[in-house]
Image: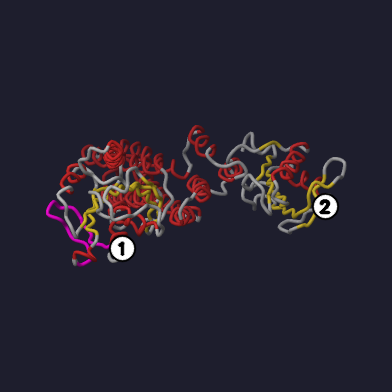
Amino acid sequence: MTGLESDTIAAIATARGNGPVGIIRLSGPQALTIAQTITSAELNARFAHYASFTDSTGSTLDTGLALYFPGPNSFTGEDVVELQGHGGHIVLQTVLHRCLDLGARSARPGEFSERAFLNGKIDLLQAEAIADLISAESETAAKLASTSLTGAFSGYVNTLAEQLNELRALTEASIDFPDEDIDVLERHSVIKRLEDCRETLSALLDDVAKSQRKTQTYTAVLYGAPNAGKSSLLNALAHDDVAIVTPLPGTTRDTLKQQVTIGELTLEIIDTAGIRETHDVIEQEGVKRARDSAATADLIIHVIDDADKPADNNECDDQTSSNLTLKVHNKIDQSGRTAGVSVSNDNLIEVAISATTGEGLSTLKTTIEELLLGEGHQNSQFSVRQRHVEALSDAIEKLGDALSAFSVHNAAELLSEDLKLVQASIDSLTGKVSSDDILGQIFSSFCIGK
């Protein structure tokens, strides 16, 4: 690992700020020597040593635990030491500066994980999963990142790479023995195997796309006529009185945003002013903001007063005709409608609920989740980034081109070259093939100390 094995890096591995415990991590050939100088102790592998952390004069900077993990059986594959002391920012900086004075240098963002990748301890998908796990803002995102970190995503990708390797071996063997070209390829049903590989890739891409949707934050606008119960629905979904609710129409004049979790979905709900013609300047601005929010929303929840069905609802239909829209018939506790899901005359899904009593709310949540995440989203299982989607899409496209060309020309030489391109796209996922620019972009997004 040129340029990295010759030096030792150090960084604070806990979040900035005061806390009960803080960790300084060292990795590299001088990690043990530096730690033993600071602690004045012989550190045994994988044993927690209680020690004082001292400066150059022998004065105590802090006290805590020192743990030594010799390479290659460590996170980075190098000698790693963790100094676990008190979590005050000043004391941690003081101990870190002592490490730097003894020959370590400050780690770049993500450099510990980068060394783990370069030393073969993790692949690129697992490295990205570490960052995704740290930055996860929902339980779903954390679970998906954890699954990728265990190597589940990598396992699927490596299986695909092995299948492509076998196909490349067949085509290259047929090139070496041209007299048996047709026999070799036909005997092993190469076209059928290429088609199977493309189907596997497509299924994986579908799963990856669903996983990506699960980690997004979506926006949903509560849209409708005044007094339809939009604010009441916001409060019901948020399980809190975040919006003012009164019997008077036009109570909401501005947009009100609230983030909620619905199943595996993170949703920012925007409550808006009721849509109607008005001469009130303030309410006019509220209606304008409502329309603007609806124009950019991932989902419009068109709330209708089922007990009244005012003519104002017609104004809302014009706005929602070109957007992903869910009709919600509210106040069924007054209208007598049965809670549930149906399809309207204009082919929109509609749900009957009562925001006041809670009847039909669970059905509404399930419907919102299915609309935004798609059917079968429960099967998605990986932490996904856009580059993963692009790499798989590129592999599918190149494999399709390879199939088309081979079906026409039956040329093993061309097929072998086409399969190399497909495999390069697959290998870019795990980092077997990757440019320095891509690696730099990925690891620079990590926090320092990880």
How far is mark 1 from mark 2, CA to CA?
A: 66 Å
Q: Say what amino acid the circle numbered 1 marks.
A: Thr
Q: Position of residue 321 (x, y in %)?
A: 18, 44
Q: Is 282 situated above or below 271?
A: above
Q: Say what amino acid the circle numbered 2 marks.
A: Ala
Circle 2 crowding by C-alpha within 10 Å: few under 14, some 14–19, many from 20: some
Residue 347 lies in the magenta-colored region: yes
Q: Hey, which residue is sitting farthest top in the picture?
A: 437
* Helix, strand or loop for disc 1: loop
Q: Position of residue 305 (x, y in %)?
A: 21, 56
Q: Nearer the viewer, residue 69 or 305?
A: 305
Residue 361 lies in the magenta-colored region: no
Relative to residue 115, is residue 330 drawn left or right? Answer: left
Relative to residue 177, is residue 351 drawn left or right? Answer: left
Circle 1 crowding by C-alpha within 10 Å: few under 14, some 14–19, many from 20: some
Q: Position of residue 304 (x, y in %)?
A: 21, 54
Which-is-in-front pick, marks 1 and 2? 1
Q: Is 272 situated above or below 47?
A: above
Quadrant position of residue 117: top right
Range of the magenta residues? Answer: 338-354
- The answer to the question of whether label 1 and label 2 lie on touching residues, with beta carbons closer than 8 A, is no
Instruction: Give the quarter of the figure containing the C terminus.
Output: top right
Relative to residue 444, is residue 301 drawn left or right? Answer: left
**Residue for badge 2:** 41
**Residue for badge 1:** 356
